[in-house]
Amino acid sequence: MTLNELKSDTHRQYGQFSWGHLVKGAITNRTFRVVVTMRLCQAAAAEPGLLRLALIPLKIMHRLSTHLAAVDFSWRTKVGAGIAITHGWGLVVNPGAKIGNNVTLFHGVTLGRRDRISPDGNRQTEHPVIEDEVWIGPHAIIVGGVTIGRGSRIAGGAFVTESVPPYSIVSGNPSTIVKANCTPDVMNPAPL
């Protein structure tokens, strides 16, 4: 499955898949390199036996890639095919977040967890779920157990702590829905 995801990620980045684009992007594009090393780590972790030993050097490569790209993006994050990281500087994605297909993340985006203490004293940890074809603008913050509905757009600087219905545009701090029934903004959508 990871090969198909890598093909989709390459398609989002370059408008088409080719092995040349994949290799070129992995070498020269700091944010695309993060996606490639994440996918390679996920593939190695899923392999039984000796192939799983490749996970150790791949995790080191991923750590270096995220450091050079100035992002915090765990290889353990569940990410659908066709992820696009635009600019990337300051991007923070909690490993518990779930990201759908053909999602676009801009620089400074935070997808973070929220901890709550229930009345009985137990800690409840929640992570965001980003559905397919969501566009998240620069410096948007999405925290907690919220779901961002399919095809929605989160404006730059929005602070989202409540779920967003599909095909909505959200803006502000605190966030509010400024438009319903919007058209998804997916550049070079990967055919899935």
Image (spheres, helix red, strand yellow):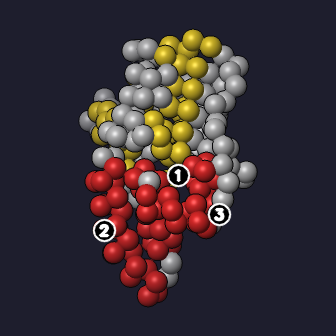
Identify the element where label 2 is drawn.
Answer: helix
Residue visible at 34% across and 50% down in the picture: 69
Tell me the residue that label 3 is attached to. 18
Distance of mark 2 from mark 1, alpha carbons?
20 Å
Judge by depth and name the residue closer to the eye, 187 or 21: 21
Identify the element where label 1 is drawn.
Answer: strand
- Left or right: 72, with 52 as reference point: left
Identify the element where label 3 is drawn.
Answer: loop
C-beta proximity under 8 Å, tags 1 and 3: no
Q: Earlier in the sequence, mark 2 or mark 3?
A: 3
Distance of mark 1 from mark 3, alpha carbons?
21 Å
Q: Earlier in the sequence, mark 2 or mark 1?
A: 2
The residue type indicated by label 2 comes to Ile
Distance of mark 2 from mark 3, alpha carbons?
26 Å
Q: Residue furthest bottom?
A: 50
Q: Earlier in the sequence, mark 1 or mark 3?
A: 3
